[in-house]
């Protein structure tokens, strides 16, 4: 039997062509490979499938620490919603709600692409039922409008591709989010229901009883859950995870008052302040802080946050997962990039908790060093960043927020410039870019997050004055979470790939750089970060 570090035979083929979830036609179509993976508790396949145990009525992650069930008692599912639809309840020990999600990128099967995009949209707590909506049907209407298809067509394609109805998928996502809050926090049940998108406590209780056999209060007191509520929320990832690389990347860009990066003998800690959008029906943004900790010898991240952010915990958890790239699949990435670079050893592409902030940093970092860009950002925060109300629980060193889009947009003197930005050493071209960006985000013309439409957002960014392809691709990589983003015009990238010979034109360099990257698709974003950090691939040069 292979060790936990050895891929189970039959599963490696899944990583060769990353694509949308394939329902029962994918991983679970090879039950012997799935059983081998769960027998070895191989964490690299966490989130790729779930095991329903017919003798207990429970479904588990492949990393569950309980004794492996008999093969004849196992059924395999790619989605938690499929397992719940088949009548299985989530395991209290391995907690399926902690499993990393599967990021799907493909350019082949249009039906699978549509279903995968619909599932990704339903995963976002911002799209769950709003206050006052008695059921989830309006969500489906909004989703169909977002995808440009009819509600009926969407439901048919979703169920045919993923093996579960979209409303069932949405219900499972909301219930698992509620289950995590009930287990890891001391939030009152009423607040858990609201945070999970339920319009009333009665509907929340009814859904919990229907799916899990207990009402939420009874669940919190049940064996295996009672006493687990803690200050930290647990977030899982697939190993390996390059903590040193992430710490180095974030520390080089950290701004005083806004964020701290603290390596330690008990694991890496990263903390920062942030601003979340108002809750549905609200007008004021939520201001607070978040801290994440990688404990040693555990494949989890522990999340703490200020009490002010608790009402938006599902949204915060999703943003943190994107910020830390916790849903990345190192096996799938290495399958494509290892022949060129060797194993990336769990390299992650850091995202962001605030897309507007990331875009501002990208503009200020144009054509300057990382240190130079950080200096300009620090001046901006010192001058315009509002103070963060602090208390005894606030991590040391956090006391400011990044200025929001409304603040920067209001600086416009009517001619597309801002004298106070000039006083910070920001040249006029970048002033115009920052003000145009702030106006676009403030008015809602641009959304800079993982759910934004890629082509439309890239076009909107490059239409802004002073924003070129490099900046747009960098924003796409970190804010839009596009793993194939590729800033082909980057000078460091071209130098290390040898695609900027003397006398060549900018277009020739772009074409040569694009050609050199063709074999790295669809993970070119990870290749770029690897080259920036460690030098060219072995096929081009040596580290």
Image (cartoon, grey):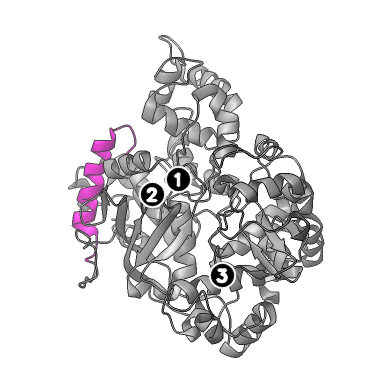
**Nearest to N terminus: mark 3 or mark 2:** 3
Callout 1 touching callout 2 (CB < 8 Å): yes
Res. 92 mark: 3
Q: Is residue 478 left or right of residue 482?
A: left
The mark that comes first in sequence, 1 or 3, is 3
Q: Which residue is mark 2?
A: 358
The answer to whether any part of residue 419 appears in the image is: no
Q: Which numbered marker is on residue 478?
A: 1
Magenta residue check for 242:
no
Q: Nearer the viewer, mark 1 or mark 3?
A: 3
Q: Secondary structure at mark 3?
A: loop
The residue at the point 45 percent across, 18 percent down is 497
Residue at figure coordinates x 43%, y 34% from the top left: 529
The prevailing secondary structure element of the residues shown in magenta is: helix
Q: Is residue 232 above or below residue 522?
A: below
Quadrant for the N terminus, please: top right
User: Mark 3 Cα within 10 Å, few/some/many (few <14, many 20+)?
Assistant: some
Q: Nearer the viewer, residue 295 or 399?
A: 295
Residue 373 found in image quarter: top left
243 up-or-down from 52: above or below? above
Nearest the camera: 484 or 434? 484
Left or right for 349, reference 423: right
Instruction: Give the residues in magenta.
Output: 365-387
Residue 455 point in image, percent of width and height: 59, 45
Q: Quadrant where the C terminus lies?
A: top left
> Could you tell me if residue 117 is visible in this image?
yes
């Amino acid at each position: 039997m292979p060790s936990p570090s050895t891929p189970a035979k039959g599963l490696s083929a899944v990583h060769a062509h990353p694509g949308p979830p394939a329902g029962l036609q994918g991983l679970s179509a090879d039950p012997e490979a799935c059983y081998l993976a769960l027998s070895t508790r191989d964490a690299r396949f966490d989130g790729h499938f779930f095991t329903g145990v017919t003798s207990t009525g429970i479904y588990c992650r492949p990393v569950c620490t309980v004794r492996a069930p008999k093969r004849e008692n196992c059924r395999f599912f790619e989605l938690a919603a499929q397992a719940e639809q088949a009548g299985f309840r989530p395991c209290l020990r391995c907690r399926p709600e902690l499993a990393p999600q599967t990021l799907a990128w493909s350019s082949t099967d249009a039906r699978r692409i549509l279903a995968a995009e619909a599932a990704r949209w339903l995963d976002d707590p911002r799209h769950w039922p709003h206050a006052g909506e008695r059921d989830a049907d309006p969500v489906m209407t909004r989703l169909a409008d977002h995808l440009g298809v009819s509600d009926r067509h969407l439901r048919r394609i979703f169920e045919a591709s993923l093996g579960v109805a979209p409303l069932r998928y949405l219900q499972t996502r909301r219930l698992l989010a509620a289950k995590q809050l009930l287990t890891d926090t001391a939030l009152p049940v009423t607040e858990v229901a609201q945070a999970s998108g339920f319009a009333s406590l009665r509907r929340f209780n009814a859904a919990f009883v229907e799916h899990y056999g207990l009402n939420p209060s009874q669940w919190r007191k049940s064996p295996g859950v009672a006493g687990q509520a803690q200050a930290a929320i647990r977030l899982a990832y697939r190993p390996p995870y390059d903590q040193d690389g992430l710490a180095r990347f974030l520390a080089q860009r950290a701004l005083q008052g806004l964020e701290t990066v603290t390596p330690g003998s008990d694991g890496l800690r990263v903390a920062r302040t942030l601003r979340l959008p108002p809750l549905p029906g609200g007008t004021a943004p939520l201001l607070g802080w978040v801290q994440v900790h990688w404990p040693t010898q555990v494949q989890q991240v522990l999340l703490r946050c200020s009490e002010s952010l608790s009402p938006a915990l599902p949204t915060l958890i999703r943003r943190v997962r994107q910020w830390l790239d916790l849903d990345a699949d190192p096996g799938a990435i290495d399958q494509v990039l290892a022949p060129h670079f060797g194993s990336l050893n769990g390299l992650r592409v850091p995202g962001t908790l605030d897309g507007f902030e990331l875009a501002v940093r990208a503009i200020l970092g144009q054509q300057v060093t990382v240190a130079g860009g950080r200096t300009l950002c620090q001046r901006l925060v010192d001058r315009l960043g509002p103070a963060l109300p602090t208390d005894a629980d606030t991590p040391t060193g956090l006391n400011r927020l990044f200025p929001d889009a409304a603040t920067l947009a209001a600086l416009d003197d009517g001619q597309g410039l801002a004298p106070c930005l000039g006083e910070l050493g920001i040249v006029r071209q970048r002033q115009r870019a920052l003000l145009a960006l702030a106006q676009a985000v403030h008015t809602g013309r641009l959304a800079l997050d993982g759910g934004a439409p890629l082509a439309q957002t890239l076009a909107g960014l490059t239409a802004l004055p002073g924003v070129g392809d490099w900046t747009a691709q960098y924003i796409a990589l970190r804010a839009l979470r596009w793993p194939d983003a590729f800033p082909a015009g980057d000078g460091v990238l071209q130098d290390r790939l040898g695609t900027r010979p003397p006398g060549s034109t900018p277009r020739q360099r772009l074409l040569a750089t694009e050609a050199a990257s063709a074999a790295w698709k669809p993970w070119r974003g990870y290749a770029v970060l690897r080259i920036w950090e460690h030098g060219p691939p072995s096929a081009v040069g040596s580290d």
